[in-house]
Image (spheres, grey):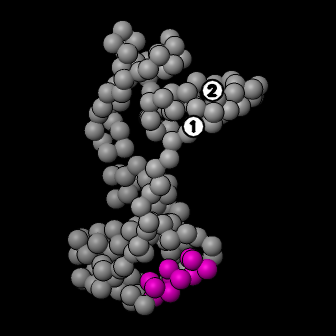
Amino acid sequence: YSKLHKKSYEKDLTKDKLIREYFGDKYLNHLTLDDMEQYKAKRLEDGVCKSTVNRDMAFFKAMVNRAVQLGSLPPTPLQRIKLFREPPGRLRYLSQVEINRLLNACGKNPKAPHLKPIVSVALYTGMRSGEIFHLKWGCVDLKNRLIHIDQSKNGKSREIPMNQVVFETLS
């Protein structure tokens, strides 16, 4: 299901491997909420942060819900796994001094001359790395100073205005 329907397929494989290694050959219908709490505790002991454990548990819940949906597993308490409370994300912007230092460092790397334009576009548009790496020239409208993203992370298209730095970089 993940391979066909999700962009995070590779990450799902990693989470699946971790869960399988921990639980071994145990079947889903033999797992309890207590087993899941022990798994969460083990992950924290391994030095993983709570948000990472939450992503593991969200994946596991999705797997269990899919099995129930397909009729491979009867409704189970595992569908009610509790996630850790996470603090709200911290919103921080780079200062102009930090931006200048970052761009200067990118420009000084002789092994990666392509790095500075990529970082510039990311800084001044807020585009995600996947959006930048999949950008085609047909999506760049220099006349109207717009970048057309056909499919963003949420699956919707959007337009991003270019400031002078991005316009000059892409020109």
Q: Which residue is mark 2?
A: 116
Amino acid marked by disc 1: Ser
Label 2 and label 1: CA atoms lie apart by 17 Å
- The answer, for residue 24, to whether it is visible in the render is no
| In the image, residue 42 lies in the stretch drawn in magenta | yes
Q: Which residue does the image show at 36% across and 9% down from the upper left?
A: 143
The numbered mark, 2 or 1, whose residue comes first in the sequence reads 1
Q: Which residue does the image show at 63% across and 36% down from the upper left?
A: 98
Q: Quadrant of the N terminus?
A: bottom left
Q: Which residue does the image show at 43% across and 68% down from the upper left?
A: 86
Q: Which residues are magenta?
A: 35-45
- The answer, for residue 22, to whether it is visible in the render is yes
Nearer mark to the viewer, of 2 and 1? 1
When the figure is inspected, residue 69 is found, relative to residue 88, above or below; the finding is below
- Relative depth, front residue between 22 and 98: 98
In the image, which disc is placed on residue 95? 1
When the figure is inspected, residue 30 is found, relative to residue 45, above or below; the finding is below
User: Residue 55: image x %, image y %?
Assistant: 44, 66
User: Residue 90: image x %, image y %?
Assistant: 47, 55
User: Residue 44: image x %, image y %?
Assistant: 57, 77
Left or right of 156, for residue 34:
right
- Relative depth, front residue between 138 and 5: 138
When the figure is inspected, residue 46 is found, relative to residue 31, above or below; the finding is above
